[in-house]
Image: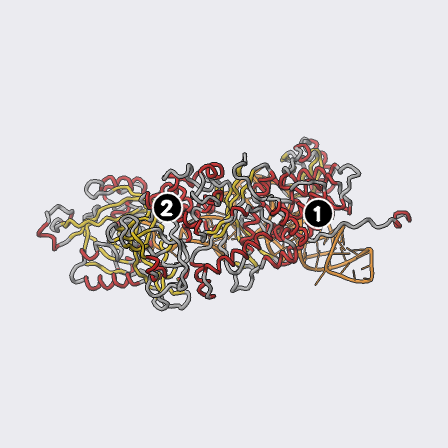
Amino acid sequence: MTDFEATQPAEELPPGYDPSVVEQRWQARWEAEATNVTDLSDGERPFYALMMFPYPSAEGLHVGNLFAFTGNDIYGRFQRLKGHTVFEPLGYDAFGIHSENFAIKVGVHPSELIPRNIDNFRRQLKRAGLMVDWSHELSTTDPGYYKWTQWVFLQLYKQGLAYKKKAAVNWCPFDKTVLANEQVIGGACERCGTPVEQRLLEQWFFRITDYAGRLLSNLDRLDWSESTLTAQRNWIGKSEGAEIAFTVQDVMAYAGSATVNAGMSGEIAVSPIEIRVFTTRPDTLFGATYLVLAPEHPLVSQIASDDQRDDVDAYVARAAKQDVVARKTTKEKSGVFTGAYASNPATGQPIPIWIADYVLMEYGTGAIMAVPGHDERDFEFASAYDLPIVRVVAGADHTADSPLDDAFVETNGCRLVNSGRFNGLTVGEAKLAIVTELSVRHAAVPVVNYRLHDWCISRQRYWGPPIPIVYCDACGTVPVPEDQLPVVLPQIDDFRPDDSGVSPLARHAEWYHTPCPQCGKEARRETDVSDTFLDSAWYFLRYPSSDKGDVPFDSALTRKWLPVTSYIGGNEHAVLHLLYSRFVTMVLHDGGHIDFEEPFTRFRAHGMIVREGAKMSKSRGNVVNPDEYINEWGADAFRLYLMFLGPFEEGGSFQDKGISGARGLLDRLWKSVHDARRDGSPDPEVTRKLHQTIRKVGDDIARLSYNTAIAAMMKYMNTLRAGERTPQVDEVRALVQLVSPFAPHIAEELWRVLGETTSIFDSSWPNYDERLVVEDTVTMAVQVNGKTRGTITVAKTASQDEAMAAAMAEPNVAKFVTGEVRRVIFVPGRMLNLVV
RNA sequence: GCGGGAGUGGCGGAAUUGGUAGACGCAGCAGACUUAGGAUCUGCCGCCUCACGGCGUCCGGGUUCGAGUCCCGGCUCUCGCACCA
């Protein structure tokens, strides 16, 4: 170092990076300049970037929310830079039992609590620097919103898809209140531990089962996360089988019935009572050694014999008392013989009819033919009650007499045995043959069943939209006319559920008394409110039209902006929310309100952030408060770090110290841009790396691989500053753009430092030069017998001979090539393997 | 039980089509600069070995010139559904 250099005055230091100053400045400017407000009428390339709206809890924004929103925001900002007009709205899913329970706990009315929570959420969300268009914010609790939720209900009602029926609810006999399923833990009330019972109440249902086939088949053409598609397929649960009628043999009916030839027991008369069963295995009919009815099956009392009647009645009563959850968690099978027999249509043999609660009334016909030889549940039951077990399907190494220690459920390569003239058929052939054979005399028909149930939307609660129905003595059930919506949820102080088993609204005669909309006589409102999932099943339709008071969704805006271009959310909603949204969309389509039937063109499920190896929860005490991290490190660093934790679609593990690495990138970026020189030309090698980085970051963002995109930027930063060199402006300009979706505030600031005068988000995503991203020389691995022994650097287009020559010049390689090279595997540009 | 996903350094994680395993970051170690550093910069950092070298992506087999990646069998973790005939 010369004296001259040593005495140079220190360069003026660039201003230090202070995120709190930068972030406040840009948040204020975005608001003032409406940077994030989308002109919905414009937009040649509209891009609707939707994120699942949060439930505004009193605890404030969860990092999980922020993780999801940041991931969505990066995608939205990226699409904007790619030239799309991006609409990124946000709102609050603020109705529901969650809010209500919390309100009860702290003794504050939900109508007071929720706006407070929302204010806190909005404050936190704005700090995070999301590109949200706040002019379209909505809350499901706003009468201007739930007016249209009620409208949606009425459309379903009009289309014959809403109906009322008695259904069981969970009831806590100690707290004397209706419980939601999630409030029942192991068959007991989550608050007091009292075993839960079931009560039958009249409730509103939506006929989603009518749409089961379409909901299933449409899945094939959706661009969704595979795991979500699978979850939906399983939930819909299609199974193909057959219904077969079994005839009840009844000695008492002998006198009044025609005697028919019933196989071997031709003496026995046949009554007209038929039991229809559903089975996916009609091929096993010869092995059906008994029938089982669900305890609730309507034929039970008719067929029970006098000497078994007491036992049957006792069993039915016990099953009815058992709560919904407990019945499903009890593993040991129990049942009672009814005293009646049916004849097996295949063998003509009489088989006993039992009732047991392992058969569910809601599925199939509520009755099964039990084939203990080939069904695990039937095997278990038959073993417990000593019922006959017969083999009718045999694998390659079985004979017809091979004993059954367990139910044999395999079908591949198996053939029928002990099945009369069907012996030797494969399972597939037999299914068809037996159903055909029985089609006339036993009304056997192929049937498709779904495990999906109709959607119960009634909630005996306060904090939700009242179901818009009026009951009139003269006119019956009358929907509230659309021009009388909304049916406003009244402000009442006693919003707690009580022992009446009905909604708190049912205690307010001044509210539920109303003139009948049809005849004007005194009538009564429905006092239940609707399920929160109905609120969220259509909110994406409302966002673009959130400022329209006279329609639920404006038709022109809807045509332009929907279906949703990109939807990102948690897989915990893989089934319910996403299925209900699809269903409501299909119904609105069929009702002529919209011209598409699938709401979300592309859906990606994001992962979950864990900490210390576990889900974050208040009880574990491992919750991260976003405010603290943003205060200390800045929102940009926090966003960047959250995205760097792991693959966005898988989540990651939060490590408290890791954020320093993310902040380090921003510090170095800040310094690099402020120091950047304009007095020379960019280094060709650095430029090459820059173009490679542009390509990689763009590709990675497009597939939501944010963690690797960030790694690529860090890597470029390392080369940019290697050896403490001072970068050229042209080496950093594009990098600021690459960083901008992740760290929008600092990017805006540095964009101005680079001399730009408009928002970086109105610039264009940088292009890369194809010629620069491909290297002309490559480092190839040289293996000897499959083991890497050295590397050679050759032209990308090097021939095998050139590579060989270079390899043999490598002492480490030559050392291992002891004998003759017997074989050479050469993959141009990749590797060379010598087999000796 | 059924269905989905996953097992890679001390840790989070990379490896897009079978082709140099461990990119990037955290933690750690050493050094430079410094009155000081929890700032910044440089280097090292899978395991065994002084070294040559050997071993190494949950375990056991297999296919291949070559396997984290493909096939067969098993183990573990995790999420979802839980008697759906």
Residue A745: x %, y % from top left: 65, 48
Q: Secondary structure at mark 1?
A: helix
What is the image's colouring?
A: secondary structure
**Front residue of this view, candidates A73 and A800:** A73
Instruction: Give the x, y percent position of residue A192.
Output: 40, 68
Q: Quadrant of residue A727?
A: top right
Residue shown at the point (63%, 35%) measured from the top left: A827
Instruction: Indicate whether A144 appears above or below A80.
Output: below
Report whether residue A61 is seen: no
Q: Nearer the viewer, residue A600 or A620?
A: A600
Tell me the mark number nearer the camera, choosing from 1 and 2. Answer: 2
Chain of the residue where label 2 is placed in the rendered structure? A
Distance from disc 1 to disc 2, alpha carbons, whole Å, reads 58 Å
- In the image, A588 versus A720, the foreground residue is A588
Q: Is residue B35 left or right of residue A457?
A: right
Q: Residue at x 12, y 50 (%)?
A: A269
Q: A699 or A550, which is in the foreground?
A: A550
Q: Chain of mark 1?
A: A
Amino acid type for the residue under numbered disc 2: Asp
Q: Which residue is mark 1?
A: A669
User: Could you classify mark 1 by the number of other residues whose Cα lies within 10 Å: few (under 14), some (14-19), or many (20 or more)?
Assistant: many
Q: Which mark is residue A304?
A: none
Instruction: Check the image and name the residue furthest to the front.
Output: A520
Residues marked 1 and 2 touching at CB (< 8 Å): no
Q: Is residue A310 visible?
A: yes
What residue does disc 2 label? A483
Q: Residues within 10 Å of mark 2 (few under 14, many from 20)?
A: few
| Amino acid type indicated by mark 1 | Leu
Image vertical order of residue A808 relative to residue A101, above or below: above
Earlier along the polypeptide chain: callout 1 or callout 2? 2
Q: Tell me residue A469's x, y (percent).
A: 32, 51
The mark tally for this picture is 2
